[in-house]
Image (cartoon, helix red, strand yellow):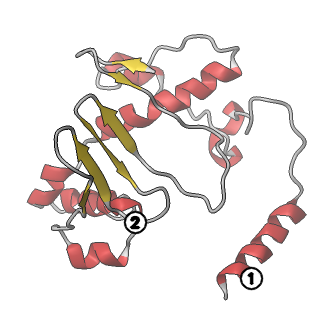
Amino acid sequence: MITLDNGAIVKSLHGEFRREPCGSNYAVYGTKGMMETRLIGGDDLYVYVSGKEGIEKYVPEKFIAADMAEKFGGHGGADFYPTHFFIQRILGREDGYKYSIDVYNAVDMGICGILAYRSILNGNIPIRIPNLRNEEERNQYRNDHACTNPEEAGDMLLPLCSKDHDPIPDEVYYEQKLKWIEENSK
């Protein structure tokens, strides 16, 4: 749970929750209403406002590159739009500047998880999140290749899991692949 600067409290639930069929939804509840997505499938948003009767269904309209976005449906556009706006920015187009984020904001969103894993591997010690806009702090990470991919990490290889575990045999992956092919060829 997080208390924001304005006093609002946010509760974030995530982790190894299991259910089938798999799916996720997003819900925001406040003192004056709520909004949430369906649990499985769809991009519709359901909104309740205190004092109004009933729940309103809001269907987000794809108004930018809608024809292309429809071909890459899923996750409310999250599978399509980040790449689309990245390309638009590289091409110097207005939509790319208006709707994309810079590399620093992108790294800010991911580095906390990366460093949290390092914290776990080191007994949950606090690890300061660097400001990579600052050249001195950025240089401390310049040759940092620590990750779980042996081809990238070199001598900085991190374990796949923070707990001891037996490696999963290749046959298990192969069996799962065959099951997936069978289920998706129907």
Q: CA distance from mark 1 to mark 2?
A: 25 Å
Q: Quarter-wise, where is residue 85 in the image?
A: bottom left
Instruction: Give the image location of residue 176, x and y in percent.
Output: 79, 68
Q: Does residue 141 lie above or below 37 as drawn?
A: above
Residue for point 30% across, 18% down: 4
Q: Does residue 54 lie above or below 73 as drawn?
A: above
- For label 2, the crowd category at 10 Å Cα-Cα, with few meaning under 14, some 14 to 19 and many 20 or more, is some
Q: Does the image show residue 143?
A: no
Instruction: Give the image location of residue 154, x and y in percent.
Output: 68, 38
Q: Does residue 62 lie above or below 115 as drawn?
A: below
Q: Residue furthest bottom?
A: 186
Residue for point 53% across, 14% down: 127
Q: Does the image show residue 94?
A: yes
Instruction: Give the image location of residue 74, x and y in percent.
Output: 41, 66
Viewer-side residue, 128 vs 41: 41
Return the residue at label 1. 182
- Direction from residue 17 to residue 104 in the image, left or right: left
Residue for point 70% across, 33% down: 158
- Direction from residue 126 to residue 160 in the image, left or right: right
Between marks 1 and 2 in the image, the one whose residue lies nearer the viewer: 2
Q: Quarter-wise, where is residue 81 in the image?
A: bottom left
Instruction: Name which of mark 1 and mark 2 comes first in the sequence.
Output: 2
Return the residue at label 2. 42
Instruction: Give the image location of residue 136, x and y in percent.
Output: 36, 16
- Direction from residue 9 to residue 14 in the image, left or right: right
Which quadrant is home to the C terminus? bottom right
What secondary structure is found at the residue carrying circle 1? helix
What secondary structure is found at the residue carrying circle 2? loop
